[in-house]
Amino acid sequence: MLANFSNVGLVTVLLFTAALFSIGLYGAMTRKAAVSVLMSLEIMILAISLNMIALAQFIPGAQMHGWHFALFLMVIGAAEVAIGLSLIVAIYRRVKTSNVEKLQVLRDEE
Amino acid sequence: MLSMIAFGVLALIILTAAIKCVSSRNVIHGAYWLLLCAVGTAGMTWFLGAEYLAIAQLLIYAGAVGILTIFTVMVTHRSLAQASREVKLSWSVLVLALGFFGLIAYGVIATPQLAQFTTAAEPIPFAEFGMTLFNLDGYTFALEAAALVLLVAIIAAVWWTKSDKAIKDVERSTSIGDAGDSPQAKQNETEASADEKDEDDAEEGDHAS
């Protein structure tokens, strides 16, 4: 194989995924469009799933469990995106904005 | 050495894509950068030795999630002016994110046990992975639970994004909420009753401001 990351080392990968997670964290807390917040959450989930796979590959005997965790994390991520995006569409239909800072009403004003 | 360089290049691509995704003014550009980030992550998963998961990640994140995100941006942002927002650097959040990274990095580096894991194990055959997934002693119940989660997510997504007319019917029957006031919403409710239109016109002032 041309490139195989089998001797990169666990610490390098963990530091990289921590950086990726921090970028997602920054985005989730600063972006104003609801879709952008969800995209930042998506980056965080990508980082976590990469973390799981790295731990599975590098720690002896953990491979099977790590793969399963990564697989279930993917399912949770897909479900979260489906619900999140449909909620954004529903909220947008109702209040005509997807700016999370304008969504401050907890109940309908009649 | 070669693998270190390849890892660095791939990591740089992913981090750049993530930063551009978080910082791009235009939401749809952010969605495209997220696609690149997902493809890069799938590539890294592949080279870490989990080929099957890499393909699944490519299909789910780069395929389904990316396209779904782009479609949602298209539905919720009608004009370019709506899609692009000014992006200001928030120093407090930046400090928080960097502090989080520093904390994790300190934890990783200060744990000497982690440094001994330098070589990856040989990938287990995929058939074995599938056997544990569908084995009653393995992960079958977790798999069924995951399937249930996905089913509930699908039903919830369909429920939330039902057509405007269905929402109008629900609103009429429960008499809560205000109707939409954008031109498109107006078009959609041409067949709706006239008294609702009056409500829209009265509320147009609030939303425009």
Image (cartoon, helix red, strand yellow):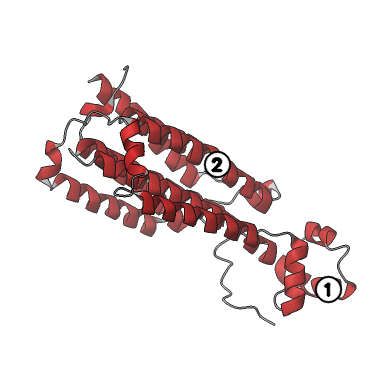
**Amino acid at circle 1:** Glu
Quadrant into which the N terminus of chain B falls = top left
* Quarter of the figure with residue A110: bottom right
Picture coordinates of residue B100 (x, y %)?
Answer: 29, 54
**From what the image shows, is residue B12 above or below residue B135?**
above
Residue linked to disc 1? B196
Residue at 48% over, 56% down = B148
Query: Is residue A78 placed above or below A106 in the rendered structure?
Result: above
Q: Position of residue A25 (x, y in %)?
A: 39, 53
Q: Are marks 2 and 1 in contact (CB under 8 Å)?
A: no
Query: Is disc 2 placed on a helix, strand or loop?
Result: helix
Q: Earlier in the sequence, mark 2 or mark 1?
A: 2
Per the image, label 1 sits on a secondary structure element best described as helix
Count numbered badges in the picture.
2
**Viewer-proximal residue, B159 or A89?**
B159
What amino acid does circle 2 point to?
A: Ala
Describe residue B150's horizontal placement relative to residue B40 as left or right. Answer: right
The percent coordinates of residue B17 (x first, y second) are 45, 37
Q: Residue placed at 20% from the left, 39% from the top?
A: A11
Mark 2 residue crowding within 10 angstroms, few (<14) / some (14–19) / many (20+) = some
How crowded pointer 1 is (Cα within 10 Å; few <14, some 14-19, many 20+) is rated as: some
- Mark number displayed over residue B64: 2
Q: Give residue B120's mark.
A: none
Answer left or right for B80 relative to B155.
Answer: right
Up-down relation of residue B200 to residue A3 (above or below): below
Query: Marks 2 and 1: which is nearer the front?
Result: 2
Q: Nearer the viewer, residue B171 or B77?
A: B171
Report the side of A109 relative to B111 (left or right): right
Quarter of the C terminus of chain B within the rendering: bottom right
Q: Which residue is most to the bottom?
A: A110
